[in-house]
Image (spheres, grey):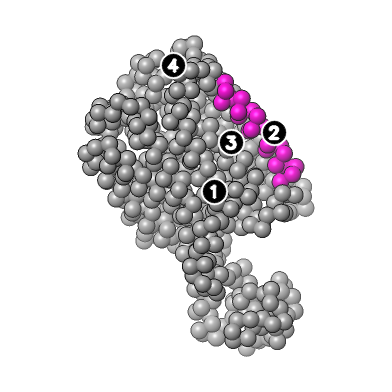
Amino acid sequence: MSDSPLGAVSSANVPHQDGTNYLHPQLTSSQCRAAEALDKTNDEVHDWEHDSANPRNWPLAKKWMTTTIASLYTLVTPLASAVMAPGLPDLAAKFGITDPTVLALTLSIFILSYAIGLLFAAPLSEVYGRVWVLHLGNLFFLAFNLGCALSTNTTSLIVFRFLAGLAGSAPVACGPGVISDLFLERERASAMALYSPAIGPVMGGFMAESVGVQYVFYVIAAISGAAAILGIPLMRETYAPLISHRLNTRALNAEKTCVGYPDLAAHHRDKWAYLWVNLKRPVILLTHSFICFILSLMYGIYFLLFTTFLDLFANVYHFSIGIGGLTYIGVGFGFVVATVFSAKLSDKIYIYLTARNGGRGRPEMRVPALIFGSFFVPVGLLWYGWSAQAKAYFMMPIIGTSIFGFGILTCFLPIQLYLVDTFTYAASATAAASAFRSFLGFAFPLFGQQMFAMLGYGGGNTLLAGFAIIIGMPFPVWIYFAGERIRTKSSLAH
């Protein structure tokens, strides 16, 4: 036991029955049990680092099965957020919506409640574990999408879309946490890049045109049901503190000792107080972490681009609703290429820089891949905007969206990995960033059409490209050099 992080701690230092360790009050109860283990030579001793119950020690097939199920859950929510976009004209005709702001609200209200839900789902998964937050979120999501399909007026549709966004936030909130639970830093990029949400608008366009926009919601509910059928029996808990707490309890009952097991603080203090601490954490991360704030701001431009698709391809290129959905393939193609390319690039850069740093990895080693991706975002915006302004052949703006899609996802992956690597509570950190950009996604479509009507496609996208250059290029370089110094000032960072 000489390799114990506690060193040679005498059993006299263990806590009294009231839980207080008078000689070493800084030790947690799990550390005290580890200290006691040093003198318990006759008892069976368990080591968390090498325990088969530790998710990072699971067989590779089990890890990837769990990741795939979590990704299937996570796929459905972005699908629902964008799948009805091409069917908005059909929706306006069905419910008699004439106000463009109300029509935009039927789409963006989902993103507003989704942002709110993220701030609750992520910390709940760090109290009660990932699995049931995922399962319950998915089942409620299924029910509320059925409510959308059966809605008979605009008000009921908006209400059910709001509730669907709340429930749909759970998989997105928990997904990065699951990956952090299962994989070491050098292994995370491929797992994080497992899904692409751009299939939604393509499916939505043809469904809205052929069978009506309400059947879009039936398809989403069906996919949620299929995910539940696979996920509920096959997915296992990955949150280490919860697993270790259960094992610690069994070991103590059997008079065995567990060494180095992470402790679930919820069982050592008032439950409601601990829950409140966890619920506050995403807000604290977003408002007190400048890095988290800046990185989430960079991704908000993505939503403004989507607000122009319907008008451009319906009114300028005169595409039908179904064919209009195909125009999202450009973004989807860029996403797919970035999913394959950026994951490998991020892993290679991280491994190379870690080797140069004596084998010690740092979150800032994710940033070079982000810097690389940031160059493509303004290029894609300018290409799309000015080819649309010139009414060039329809493939020209689609090529621009491909470049943009490649750049934005090449930025998104390192941002997610940086947040997971940096903050102790990975789910809360990524939820804080996702909530902020989702608030932008709610607000931007409400004024996006007016902005592009005033500036035109060329001028509007030039403005966005300017923001992408000002925010997206210098800040990653600054984070690369100053990030470690800033992280050391945060109590929530590793």
| 236, 308: nearer the viewer | 308
Q: Which of marks 3 and 2 is nearer the N terminus?
A: 3
Residue at the spot x=49%, y=55% of the render? 122
Q: Give the CA distance from mark 1 to mark 2.
A: 22 Å
In primary-sequence order, the first of circles 4 and 1 is 4
Q: Mark 1 points at which residue?
A: 432
Looking at the image, which residue is at 62% across and 68% down?
49
Q: Residues within 10 Å of mark 4 (few under 14, many from 20)?
A: some
In the displayed structure, does residue 154 sit left or right of residue 397?
Answer: left
Q: Nearer the viewer, residue 122 or 186?
A: 122
- Per the image, label 1 sits on a secondary structure element best described as helix
Q: Tell me which secondary structure the magenta stretch mostly adopts.
A: helix
N-terminal of the two: label 1 or label 3? 3
Q: Does the magenta stretch include residue 468?
A: yes
Q: Where is residue 87 in the image (x, y as percent from the top left)?
A: 32, 30
Is label 3 or label 4 in front? 3
Report if residue 180 lies within the magenta region.
no
Cβ–Cβ under 8 Å for marks 1 and 2: no
